[in-house]
């Protein structure tokens, strides 16, 4: 035994070497699907093929599923493995090998790299749900399309169709819902949906859902919101009637008025009229109106009317009139400037200067000017010496021209040349009189001073110098002696 063991060991080693050489010679085959994809629907036939590059006399092939679960087919020259009605339970990882028989016995090749078989159920037909469901939709309403189907194991992708072509607005194909926020007339049509799952190099589509229709009708033409009277600016306390006018042939069941977007009910809004009496500042707002007309069991709204603004103001105040020269006394032939000032700024103001009987001049301004001036030459032969002037203005407040009350009067006294001479005469005469009075006063003072000096010189002559001080202090003290 002791002698045999090394011999046996050497032989075994030799055999092992030959075997490994031979095995290396039998190259690993490759396994693939006969079709170019690896994903199958239940019931479809699947064919796997075991191939190798070099030419051999191959006696048989063996196919494996998930390594353990073995399917063997020990028939020569059949390198295909076919499943006629694939089931989900057939899914898995497939490998194969081949074998040859020769004098040395049956030799097996290496096992191929695996391929994976996926099996899907045929996707069931989805159904399209439209929420909310209406027989008729209005422009601007919103709907949600939902593509519904029983749950599936794979991530599905969705398509929505309108009139058999892809819906452009739907982009994220992983979402089974599509929201249309604002329907328009061109959204009318037949809609369906479909979903698909992607396996290995294969896309499996469901059939299309039963189509659902969406009918969109345009809103009725917008009404006109009229104001009677037709202007925008109202003075507090005035009356305004609003009228919502539908285009002529429409049968209207309801009118509604809106103030700053909020509906309000007027006493006669059923007739499309709304009266604002004794208007107040609280009614300054933007107004619109709408109407409803019946169609297909729904009341179809109109689009909103154009917005109309109501602007409420206090009555406008009279202007102020001032003059230059401010005294209002002007020589005949001289110029006097009248200034008319408004208490507020307006987009456009027309100033009117008036005398007692008529308008003298009007001045239009466009530059939100609050003051206008006019220079009048007081060249007069025969008017009375006093002229009264006043002014007023017309303000353009958002398109409405409002005339102000008149300003208080100013009086201008024209002094004619004759009266001027007379005035000069008086002034000269008065001047002469004053001059005479002054001269006689000085004369009298001097006279009194002379008398005093002569009196004091009789007393003490030295005192004369000292006593001269109080004298120089002023006539008052002297005259009191
Ligand atoms: C507003 O209407 C009322 C009632 O119709 C009327 O008495 C009033 O004089 C009107 N006011 C003005 C400013 O027109
Ligand atoms: C108009 O409204 C003012 C203030 O709201 C009120 O003082 C006045 O009496 C009202 N005039 C009429 C005619 O209703
Ligand atoms: C009065 O104004 C006119 C033109 O503005 C001028 O020609 C004239 O000299 C002025 N007269 C006096 C007295 O200033
Ligand atoms: C006074 O003026 C008026 C026009 O303003 C004229 O018709 C009338 O003849 C004038 N009288 C004198 C006395 O100049």
Image (spheres, helix red, strand yellow):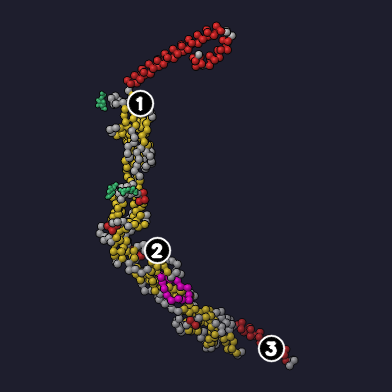
Q: Give the image location of residue 303, x and y in percent.
A: 33, 58
Query: Quick one: label 1, few (<14), some, or many (20+) residues within 10 Å?
Result: many
Mark 2 and mark 3 lie on one chain; the one further toward the N terminus is: 3
Q: Residue at x 33, y 49 (%)?
A: 279
Q: Give the image location of residue 102, x and y in percent.
A: 59, 89
SS of the residue at dot 2? loop
Q: Give the image location of residue 326, x and y in percent.
A: 38, 29
Q: Residue at x 57, y 86 (%)?
A: 99
Q: Residue at x 58, y 84 (%)?
A: 109
Question: What span is colored magenta in the figure?
Answer: 146-160
Q: Residue at x 70, y 87 (%)?
A: 10
Kindly report which numbered mark, 1 or 2, lies closer to the viewer in this rendering.
Answer: 1
Q: Name the one closer to the observer, 123 or 246.
A: 246
Q: Quadrant of residue 148?
A: bottom left
Query: Quick one: label 3, few (<14), some, or many (20+) residues within 10 Å?
Result: few
Q: Which residue is mark 2?
A: 181
The answer to whether residue 469 shows anywhere in this view is yes
Q: Quadrant of residue 418?
A: top left
Q: Is residue 219 above or below residue 433?
A: below
The CB of the residue at mark 2 lies under 8 Å from ligand 2 = no
Task: Determine contact: label 2, label 3, CB under 8 Å.
Answer: no
Q: Is residue 347 above or below residue 103?
A: above
The CB of the residue at mark 3 lies under 8 Å from ligand 2 = no
SS of the residue at dot 1? strand
Per the model, the C-alpha gap separating discs 2 and 3 is 85 Å
Q: Which residue is mark 3?
A: 11
Per the model, the C-alpha gap separating discs 1 and 2 is 78 Å
SS of the residue at dot 3? helix
Q: Which residue is mark 1?
A: 330
Q: Is residue 456 left or right of residue 319?
A: right
158 part of magenta stretch: yes
């Amino acid at each position: 035994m002791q002698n045999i063991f090394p011999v046996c060991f050497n032989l075994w080693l030799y055999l092992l070497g030959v075997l490994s050489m031979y095995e290396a010679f039998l190259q690993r085959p490759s396994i693939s699907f006969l079709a170019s994809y690896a994903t199958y629907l239940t019931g479809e036939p699947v064919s796997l093929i075991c191939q190798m590059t070099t030419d051999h006399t191959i006696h048989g092939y063996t196919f494996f599923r998930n390594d353990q679960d073995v399917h063997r087919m020990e028939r020569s020259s059949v390198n295909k493995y076919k499943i006629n009605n694939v089931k989900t339970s057939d899914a898995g990882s497939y490998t194969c090998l081949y074998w040859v028989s020769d004098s040395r016995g049956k030799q097996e090749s290496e096992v191929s790299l695996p391929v994976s078989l996926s099996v899907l159920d045929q996707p069931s037909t989805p159904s399209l749900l439209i929420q909310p469901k209406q027989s008729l939709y209005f422009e601007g309403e919103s709907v949600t399309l939902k593509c519904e189907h029983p749950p599936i194991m794979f991530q599905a992708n969705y398509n929505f169709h309108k009139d058999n072509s892809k819906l452009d607005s739907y982009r994220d194909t992983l979402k089974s819902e599509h929201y249309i926020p604002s329907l328009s007339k061109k959204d009318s049509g037949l809609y369906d949906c479909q979903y698909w799952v992607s396996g290995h190099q294969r896309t499996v589509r469901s059939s299309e859902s039963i189509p659902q229709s969406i009918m969109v009708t345009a809103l009725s033409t917008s009404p006109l919101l009229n104001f009677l009277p037709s202007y925008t600016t109202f003075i507090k306390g005035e009356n305004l009637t609003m009228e919502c006018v539908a285009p002529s042939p429409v049968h209207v069941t309801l009118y509604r008025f809106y103030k700053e977007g909020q509906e309000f009910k007027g006493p006669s809004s059923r007739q499309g009229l709304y009266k604002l009496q004794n208007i107040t500042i609280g009614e300054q707002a933007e107004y619109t109106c709408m109407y409803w007309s019946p169609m297909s069991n729904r009341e179809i709204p109109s689009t909103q009317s154009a917005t109309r603004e109501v602007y409420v103001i206090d009555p406008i105040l009279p202007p102020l009139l001032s003059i230059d020269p401010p005294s209002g006394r002007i020589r005949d032939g001289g110029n006097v400037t009248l200034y008319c000032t408004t208490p507020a700024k307006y987009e456009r103001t027309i100033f009117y200067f008036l005398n007692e009987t008529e308008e003298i001049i009007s001045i239009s301004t466009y530059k939100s000017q609050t003051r206008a001036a006019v220079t009048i030459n007081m060249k007069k032969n025969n008017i009375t010496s006093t002229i009264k002037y006043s002014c007023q203005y017309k303000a353009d407040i958002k398109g409405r021209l409002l005339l102000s009350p008149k300003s208080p009067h100013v009086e201008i006294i024209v002094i004619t040349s004759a009266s001027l001479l007379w005035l000069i005469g008086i002034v000269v005469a008065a001047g002469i009189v004053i001059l005479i009075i002054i001269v006689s006063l000085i004369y009298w003072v001097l006279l009194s001073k002379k008398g005093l000096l002569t009196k004091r010189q009789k007393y003490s002559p030295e005192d004369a110098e000292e006593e001269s001080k109080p004298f120089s202090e002023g006539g008052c003290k002297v005259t009191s002696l």
